[in-house]
Amino acid sequence: MSTHLQARRFGHVLALTILASLLGIAGARADNTDDPSTEAAQPARQPGRANDSRVPEPGTLVDLQRRLDSITAAGTSECLPAYAAHKAQAWLNFGRYAAAEQLPAAAQAALMKNAGGIVQSLEQHGESTPDTPELPGARHVRDDLWQAIAAVKRDSRFCAAPKMTAYCEVQLAWAGYEAGAGGWRHADPYVRIAEDYCSTAIATPPTASAVVPEQTPPAQPTAPVAAPPPPPQQQQQQQQRIDLSMSVVFPHNRATRADIRPPGRAELRRFSSRIKSLPKGTIIRIAGHADLTGHTDYNLRLSGQRARSVARELEMLGVPRARIRLTAAGSSEPVVQCAVDDKVAERRRYLACLEPNRRVVIHVITAVP
């Protein structure tokens, strides 16, 4: 083979090699989602915030939420309207989730019907206690919790914990729906959240001055009755509550025991030592919270996991599990509001600003005669 022919073939091979290399670089740039120039061209939105891909909320839900907000803005000191308002809000929360996940129309209609009936009753100043109907296709779950929360509604704990009572019932109804839709294993996380709500309401100390919503029979004419003797002095004394509290924050999207930061662990060690010196009747309420960078249902589960992690840490420090009551608030009770910036470079600062919302709050309540 001549030297001239070899040179030509070598030139062709070199040209093809260079062309393939250029095409490979171009393809890698197109597929590389971590490239800063690509991110700058298409800013990422914060998780959980509205965008064009999310299902818009139904008009009925938006209207009911507006009406309920108007009712709650007026405020009330009576336990029955407060309980009813919390129950309507719980139904609306699940209605919002059902719409976003495009769950069956029958379930969405039932959620809106339940919320709408309560809102209408509140607008008309109705005095009836709203019931908790089970959703279409639901299975009846945890009858023991249903019975226990019914007992709460018959005494003054109902007025001391109207929110937890309402959330317990609605969460149980939703757990039954999830059990019917996906089986018992699928429903287990929802049942655990219901346990947290219900146990908090059940453990609430009775409020002597509360008005329990019971039907009062009509007065019957009777002969004069002598006034009863005054109760013992021990019963006349009002109970005082010593309320000690602290909070532990978690990193973004984290909820395990290992995610509790060293300063939080040190605080829990000091706190557990103080708890051990309190009377045996002490109740330790642990409430988990989340920020708004996620779906409502996910945030609720995440906040519950955080509360359970702190509870396990306290157990490891010697605090009896029988004293602990858990609850999860999701992202419904933020303590800070942070401005949203769509720039990728500002996301870390935005998440740092939201850290106080990713908290677990511990309240220690001791009744002292």
Image (cartoon, grey):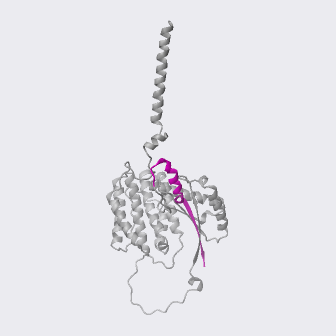
Q: Is residue 224 above or below residue 254?
A: below
| Residue 314 placement, left or right of 102 | right
Count of residue discs: 0
Residue 276 image point, x, y percent: 66, 67
Residue 363 included in the magenta stretch of the image: yes
Q: Nearer the viewer, residue 261 or 145?
A: 261
Residue 339 included in the magenta stretch of the image: no
Q: Write the residue at 32% across / 58% down.
A: 59
Q: Is residue 79 above or below residue 295?
A: below
Residue 139 makes an appearance in the image: no
Residue found farthest to the top: 1
Picture quadrant of residue 268: bottom right
Q: Nearer the viewer, residue 84 or 261?
A: 261
Q: Quadrant of the C terminus?
A: bottom right
Residue 255 image point, x, y percent: 55, 54
- The magenta stretch is 340-369
Residue 144 image point, x, y percent: 49, 64
Q: Write the residue at 40% across / 68% down.
A: 85
Q: Is residue 77 above or below residue 146?
A: below
Residue 230 image point, x, y percent: 54, 88
Q: Nearer the viewer, residue 149 or 82?
A: 82
Residue 135 makes an appearance in the image: yes
Q: Write the residue at 57% across / 65% down.
A: 362
